[in-house]
């Protein structure tokens, strides 16, 4: 499958955020002898996860502190997003949600309006291409009332179906026919049998498909809708719909761009409009309270670091989209500050069975390109949700480890650090690590540890992920009682 290439901008941000701290580490290394450690253990944490970090310190972290040849650090960003979570487009990043002024009006809107561009200037016409589907995300509840397609599409074929679907199910499916069409200029407007409300956070795709399983709409030459450049689409940037991708063929996607003109659009009204009015009126108050919260949070992080000296603070925002950056910074920090045999990454909701881990990190084989985890093989690339990835150029990812944790030898870590300028984040940080290893060290050995994660056949496991603070404390107490 062919998909769009990686983002140069992401690579630049990924690399530049690390330059200054690495220079400082290099200077420090020349002035002092680099200490030796058998294992560097990095715990990925969020700035406000004070209770999670304290639970680790009081449980399995206390066992790690008793090992003189192990260094443990909690890995955090040194900055918080200044935008209140309610004013962000996504909970995973730090992009502001700009509300359009006309959203509170009770009038229908469309994703885009398509029309002939015979009198338009060439620069305003849509780019050539066959776009059969449109992926989108709902930022505020909307009510879908109609679907719209060019009339020439319906005239050109009698076996087309319009679908609205998400990753789990098809929400609406309509056979396209002239009898179902209400003409609106050059478009055919198709009324839904009932209004369909899509909630905030809904991610899905609106597409036109053929009933014939192997029939490719882009090869049928049904019309001159796109290829002749005779149409233009005016997109409605109304701030309640975020356009994500365009489907060109069955398994070919590209990022959405405003010069595209897909086969299908939708007409909708904005639901819960009083909420938008109240949301806008309270924004200033919300922002002020958020800034006070961040000031208090910063003071608590500084106090925590002063007391424990076990935080590794990275020079970037502490948001989910930068998790891959956190891991790479951990690898570079370890490489430039220690002579080590292994590096391990875990999440702060994960319990580490230190005794079982010690059986893995002996003094042999650290010069080989090896890593340990429970690995995922032939995992499909997701187009939706928290881990959506429109930049990886394949249908499936290379082998990648369990996100809760993985262990790597020094030689493998060093190879990744040496190539960091050419490595671009993809989806989650575990996926990114799998892609990086496959591209830099194709011959690296993946060792699937049988009891890396809990299993019915394992009395104990190396890691136990996704625990609450209370669960971690109780599980550690049970584990130590059995020792």
Image (cartoon, rainbow, N blue to C red):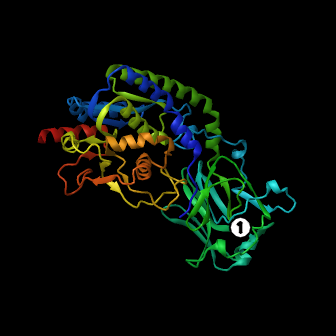
| Depicted 125 relative to depicted 413: above or below | below
Left or right: 176 as drawn, with respect to 362: right
In the picture of the structure, the residue carrying the numbered disc 1 is 149
Q: On the rendered image, what quadrant is the C terminus found in?
A: top left
Q: Name the residue rendered at 82%, 57% in the picture.
A: 122
Image label count: 1
Left or right: 172 as drawn, with respect to 466: right
In this rendered view, identify the residue nearer to me: 141 or 59.
59
In this rendered view, identify the residue nearer to me: 229 or 383.
229
Any part of residue 150 in sight = yes
Q: Residue furthest right?
A: 119
Q: At which x and y percent is residue 204?
A: 56, 59
Q: Name the residue rendered at 31%, 36% in the picture.
A: 41
Q: At which x and y percent is residue 268?
A: 67, 57
Q: At which x and y percent is residue 411?
A: 33, 42
Quarter where residue 305 is shown: top left
Left or right: 344 as drawn, with respect to 92: left
Q: At which x and y percent is residue 283?
A: 61, 33
Any part of residue 178 in sight = no
In this rendered view, identify the residue nearer to me: 47 or 118.
118
Secondary structure of residue under mark 1: strand
For the residue carrying disc 1, how many other residues have a C-alpha within 10 Å: few (<14), some (14-19), or many (20+)?
Answer: many
């Amino acid at each position: 499958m062919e998909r769009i290439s990686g983002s140069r901008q992401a690579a630049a941000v990924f690399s530049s955020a690390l330059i200054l701290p690495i220079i400082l580490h290099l200077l420090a290394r020349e002035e002092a002898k680099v200490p030796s450690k058998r294992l560097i253990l990095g715990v990925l944490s969020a700035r406000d996860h004070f209770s999670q970090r304290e639970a680790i310190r009081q449980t399995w972290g206390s066992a790690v502190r008793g090992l003189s040849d192990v260094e443990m650090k909690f890995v955090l960003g040194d900055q918080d997003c200044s935008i209140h979570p309610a004013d962000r487009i996504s909970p995973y990043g730090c992009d502001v949600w700009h509300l359009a002024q006309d959203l509170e009006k009770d009038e229908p809107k469309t994703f885009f309006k398509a029309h002939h561009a015979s009198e338009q200037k060439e620069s305003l016409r849509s780019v050539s291409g066959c776009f059969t589907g449109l992926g989108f995300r709902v930022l505020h509840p909307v009510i879908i009332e109609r679907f719209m397609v060019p009339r020439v599409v319906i005239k050109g074929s009698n076996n087309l179906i319009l679908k609205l679907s998400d990753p789990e199910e098809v929400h609406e499916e309509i056979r396209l026919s002239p009898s179902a069409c209400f003409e609106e200029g050059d478009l055919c407007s198709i009324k839904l049998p009932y209004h369909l409300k899509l909630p905030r956070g809904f991610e899905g795709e609106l597409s036109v498909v053929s009933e014939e399983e192997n029939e490719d709409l882009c090869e049928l030459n049904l019309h001159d809708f796109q290829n002749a450049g005779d149409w233009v689409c005016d997109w409605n940037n109304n701030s309640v719909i975020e356009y994500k991708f365009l489907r060109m063929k069955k398994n070919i996607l590209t990022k959405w761009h405003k010069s595209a003109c897909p086969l299908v659009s939708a007409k909708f009204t904005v639901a819960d409009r009083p909420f938008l009015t109240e949301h806008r009126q309270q924004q200033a108050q919300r922002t002020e309270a958020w800034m006070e919260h961040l000031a208090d949070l910063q003071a608590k992080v500084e106090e925590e670091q002063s007391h424990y000296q076990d935080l590794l603070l990275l020079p970037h925002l502490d948001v989910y989209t930068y998790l891959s950056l956190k891991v790479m910074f951990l690898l570079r920090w370890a490489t430039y500050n220690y002579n080590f045999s292994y590096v391990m990454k875990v999440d702060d909701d994960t319990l580490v069975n230190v005794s079982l881990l010690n059986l893995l990190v002996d003094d042999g084989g650290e010069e080989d390109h090896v890593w340990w985890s429970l690995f995922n093989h032939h995992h499909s690339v997701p187009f939706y949700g928290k881990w959506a990835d429109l930049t990886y150029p394949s249908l499936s990812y290379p082998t990648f480890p369990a996100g809760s944790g993985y262990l790597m030898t020094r030689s493998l870590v060093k190879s990744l650090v040496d190539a960091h300028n050419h490595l671009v984040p993809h989806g989650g940080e575990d996926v990114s690590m799998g892609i990086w290893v496959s591209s830099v060290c194709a011959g690296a050995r993946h060792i699937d540890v049988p009891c890396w994660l809990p299993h019915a056949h394992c009395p104990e496991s190396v890691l136990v992920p996704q625990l609450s603070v209370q669960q971690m404390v109780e599980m550690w107490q049970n584990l130590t009682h059995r020792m």
